Amino acid sequence: MKKLVAYFSATGVTADVAKNLAEAAGADLFEIKPAVPYTEADLDWRDRTSRSSMEMRDLISRPAIADRETDLSGYDTIFLGFPIWWYVAPTIINTFLESRDFSGKRIILFATSGSSGLGKCAENLRESAPGAEITDGRMMNGSPSVSELAEWVKSIIKN
């Protein structure tokens, strides 16, 4: 069973967790990079006119991603990570899911957040990946160790 950890990280917090998870799961790593990187001003959630605020208010917003060509078809299980924005996954995650065929894949979500949980992330993302099994994984706040993540991976994946 071939595994992948795909992640979007605006500030580096989710990236750190994703790297530990990839090591713990024996998985490859793929960064979902925006075609236009987010600046600090873009991420200012207190500013209603910031890029991230405007994207999250627009349910059909699909920020462009930099790499739409990498073939991810050989993976059975994909851990998909992101920071929680406005209680849901950032819309760039929809862009990623809609840019490839994930039919028959198992997608396990993980996220980082200062204050909220996964909520309805799995439910909200299913429409963007028809034919995939998308399930909530866990919140990854507090930088879990590789050994802690390895135990979690073993509990949810039967190799």
Image (cartoon, grey):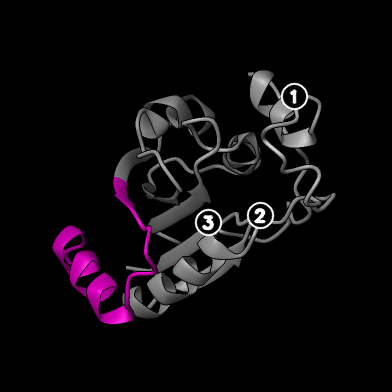
**Residue 40 percent coordinates (x, y):** 78, 51
For image coordinates 40% across by 80% down, the residue present is: 23
Helix, strand or loop at mark 2: loop
Where residue 101 sits in the image (x, y, percent)? 55, 42
Q: Is residue 115 above or below residue 6?
A: above
Q: Amino acid at mark 2?
A: Ala
Dot 2 corresponds to which residue? 10
Q: Quadrant of the C terminus?
A: bottom left
- Considering the numbered disc 3 on the image, is that residue within a helix, a strand or a loop? loop
Residue in the picture at 44% in, 61% down: 75
Identity, as a three-letter code, of the amino acid under mark 1: Arg
> What are the residue bounds of the magenta stretch?
137-158
Among the 4 quarters of the image, the one containing residue 136:
top left
Q: Nearer the viewer, mark 3 or mark 2?
A: 2
Checking the image for residue 73, the label placed there is 3
Pointer 3 and pointer 2: residues touching (CB < 8 Å)? no
Q: CA distance from mark 1 to mark 2?
A: 18 Å
Amino acid type of the residue that numbered disc 3 sits on in the rendered structure: Ser
Which secondary structure lies at badge 1?
loop
Q: Is residue 11 left or right of residue 130?
A: right
Q: Residues within 10 Å of mark 2 (few under 14, many from 20)?
A: some
83 vs 116: above or below: below
Q: Is residue 141 highlighted in magenta?
A: yes
Q: Tell me how many marks there are.
A: 3
Q: Which residue position holds label 1?
A: 48
Q: Is residue 64 above or below residue 143?
A: above
- Residue 103 place in picture, x, y as percent: 44, 40
